[in-house]
Image (spheres, rainbow, N blue to C red):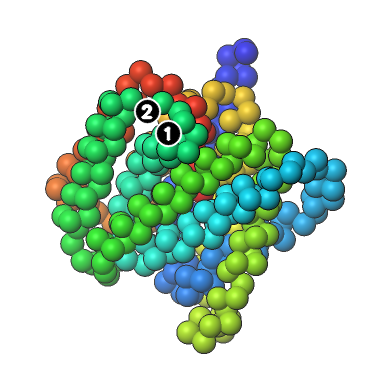
């Protein structure tokens, strides 16, 4: 591969991580005006509508017997359960802290791959995982209650549960990508997500939005277009061109971008203890990598 062709997928990965990082900020803005379930359904609906023009391409898909369970596991993990936990997380913690928790995603994927796919996990990986968990706990316990983070401990726990769902999604995706295109799999998530979150609008405490609030509404549209389509499109293109281990390494940029964007857009700040806890999370991630060669491409959703 020429140098030019090497730089393009790396640039795509960089842009995908920046977009995914911005989703934490966009969700915080959207939640200020609309109920979380209204935002998540709106995001899924926007993405589904954008996928409609290419639905005809999926008629020639060769279905494999038994794949429906993997498709359902993939979609239930993400977007269904993933967005339920992430919505609750961002109601209670800051975008910066939620972004920090995503640093543990590659470790969670390694643990699930070891459990369900029989892939080897070294002792060094387990030590790193323990350090990252300790850092995440320290980050949560040292957090102070603010207007933007009314219950950071609960929020960070929910974000961790969202990462477990993202890891489950990645493991099931590993099986599916050998036969189905990334475009189809992303569209399947969007359509099933719309069906899953639609009934929440029938709950009296949720309902339909009764007014147009410019910033929250635009943030919701942004999530459905630039994140679901843009970030996934760039990421899927890059993974088709570079080793999965290289793509996995870029995920660790999300916490950095999330903190920077949280400070610039939402005026969030981390205390000295939180910065030290974040360093411990990164250290755990670094230790876990060692000489291990990651076999799965990971995505925070």
Between 108 and 230, the residue placed more toward the observer is 108
Q: Up-down: is 156 above or below 168? A: below
- Where is residue 29 drawn, in percent x and y? 44, 65
**Residue displayed at 39% across by 66% down:** 88
- Where is residue 63 drawn, in percent x and y? 77, 43
- The residue tagged 2 is 121
Q: What is the crowding at mark 1: few (fewer than 14 residues within 10 Å), some, or many (at least 20)?
A: some
Q: Up-down: is 33 above or below 298? A: below
Q: Up-down: is 286 above or below 276? A: above
**20 to the left or right of 131:** right
- Where is residue 77 drawn, in percent x and y? 52, 53
Tell me, yes or no, if residue 169 can be seen here. yes
Cα separation, mark 1 vs mark 2, equals 6 Å
Between 79 and 76, the residue placed more toward the observer is 76
**241 to the left or right of 250:** right
- Where is residue 39 drawn, in percent x and y? 53, 68
- The residue tagged 1 is 114
**Residue displayed at 68% across by 50% down:** 68
Which label was assigned to residue 172? none
Which image quadrant: the N terminus? top right
Q: What is the crowding at mark 2: few (fewer than 14 residues within 10 Å), some, or many (at least 20)?
A: some
**278 to the left or right of 247:** left
**Residue displayed at 41% across by 26% down:** 120
Q: Please identify the quarter of the rendering in which residue 207 is found.
A: bottom right
Q: Up-down: is 295 above or below 217? A: above
SS assignment at label 2 = loop
């Amino acid at each position: 591969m020429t140098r030019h062709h090497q730089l393009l997928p790396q640039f795509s990965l960089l842009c995908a991580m920046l977009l995914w990082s911005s989703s934490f900020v966009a969700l915080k803005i959207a939640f200020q005006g609309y109920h979380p379930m209204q935002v998540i359904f709106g995001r899924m609906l926007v993405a589904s509508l954008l996928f409609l023009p290419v639905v005809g391409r999926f008629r020639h898909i060769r279905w494999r017997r038994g794949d429906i369970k993997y498709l359902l596991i993939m979609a239930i993990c993400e977007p269904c359960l993933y967005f339920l936990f992430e919505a609750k997380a961002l109601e209670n913690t800051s975008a910066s802290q939620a972004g920090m928790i995503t640093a543990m995603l590659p470790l969670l994927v390694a643990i699930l791959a070891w459990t369900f796919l029989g892939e080897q996990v070294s002792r060094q990986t387990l030590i790193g995982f323990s350090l990252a968990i300790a850092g995440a706990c320290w980050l949560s316990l040292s957090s102070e209650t603010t207007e933007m983070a009314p219950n950071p401990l609960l929020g960070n726990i929910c974000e961790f549960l969202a990462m477990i769902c993202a890891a489950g999604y990645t493991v099931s995706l590993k099986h599916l990508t050998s036969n189905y295109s990334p475009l189809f799999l992303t569209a399947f998530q969007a359509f099933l997500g719309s069906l899953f979150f639609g009934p929440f609008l029938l709950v009296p405490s949720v309902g339909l939005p009764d007014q147009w609030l410019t910033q929250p509404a635009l943030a919701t549209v942004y999530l459905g277009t630039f994140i679901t389509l843009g970030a996934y499109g760039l990421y899927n293109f890059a993974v088709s061109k570079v080793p999965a281990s290289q793509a996995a390494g870029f995920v660790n940029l999300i916490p950095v971008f999330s903190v920077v964007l949280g400070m610039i857009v939402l005026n969030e700040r981390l205390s000295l203890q939180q910065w030290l806890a974040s360093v411990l999370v990164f250290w755990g991630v670094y230790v876990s990598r060692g000489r291990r060669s990651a076999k799965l491409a990971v995505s925070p959703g």
